[in-house]
Amino acid sequence: MFKNKKFAKNVAIAVVAVFLLGVFGLALSQSGKGYAAGAGTASNIGKVNYQRLINESPEFSKFKETMQNEVAQAQKDFDEKSKTMNDKEKQDYSNQLRERLSLKEQELKAPIFDKIDAAVKAVADAKGLAVVLDVNNIVYGGQDITDDVLKKLTAK
């Protein structure tokens, strides 16, 4: 069919090139973005300072106060009950109190984190952001929405 080897070689190269371009085009179409989609368009990645959101959350001061009371109560319980305990019993009781305080802390923080996460999601949805990361995980770029999330948290 192909008597001229040079012609056959050129056809083979053309077929391979078309194949590779097709694979590349398919990969781009499946990613949802073109190669230069980010050029000149707004980023759909947001960033927040999550630690700042926690610290400035209206519920955080209540959390700190409650935890201080819990720690004071645990210390009082330990002081009263450990008077008659040996060192091993004191250590075991101290570990129990630490575990209780840790569980209480998790119980009190969960609603704060839930409210922050909901506010982040609401602001991200309103701004059309597909991803929101903590500022500590970003080297460059991203739209900072921390202030908008704080406004949403304090408006409730």
Image (cartoon, rainbow, N blue to C red):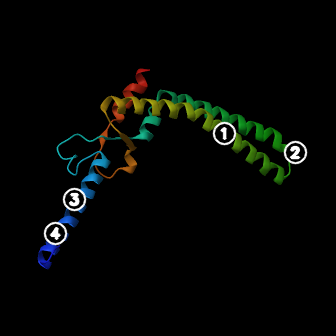
Q: SS of the residue at dot 1?
A: helix
Which quadrant of the figure has residue 142? top left
Relative image position of residue 93 (x, y in whole percent): 78, 46
Q: CA distance from mark 1 to mark 3?
A: 57 Å
Q: Nearer the viewer, mark 1 or mark 3?
A: 3
| Quadrant into which the N terminus falls | bottom left
Residue 22 shown left or right of residue 8 in the figure: right
Q: CA distance from mark 2 to mark 1?
A: 27 Å
Which numbered dot is residue 84?
2
Q: Nearer the viewer, mark 3 or mark 2?
A: 3
* Viewer-nearest residue: 84 or 23: 23
Whether pointer 3 and pointer 2 mark residues with C-beta atoms closer than 8 Å, the reply is no
* Residue at the extreme top: 156
The type of residue carrying mark 3 is Leu
Residue denoted by label 1: 103
Whether pointer 4 and pointer 1 mark residues with C-beta atoms closer than 8 Å, the reply is no
The type of residue carrying mark 4 is Val
The residue positioned 43% from the left and 40% from the top of the image is 50
Relative image position of residue 4 (x, y in whole percent): 12, 78
Q: CA distance from mark 4 to mark 3?
A: 15 Å
The type of residue carrying mark 2 is Thr
Which quadrant of the figure has residue 65? top right
Which numbered dot is residue 55?
none
The type of residue carrying mark 1 is Leu
Q: SS of the residue at dot 4?
A: helix
Q: CA distance from mark 4 to mark 1?
A: 71 Å
Residue denoted by label 4: 11
Which numbered dot is residue 21?
3
- Of the numbered discs 4 and 1, the one sitting upstream in the chain is 4
* Viewer-nearest residue: 42 or 92: 42
Q: SS of the residue at dot 3?
A: helix
The residue positioned 35% from the left and 39% from the top of the image is 130
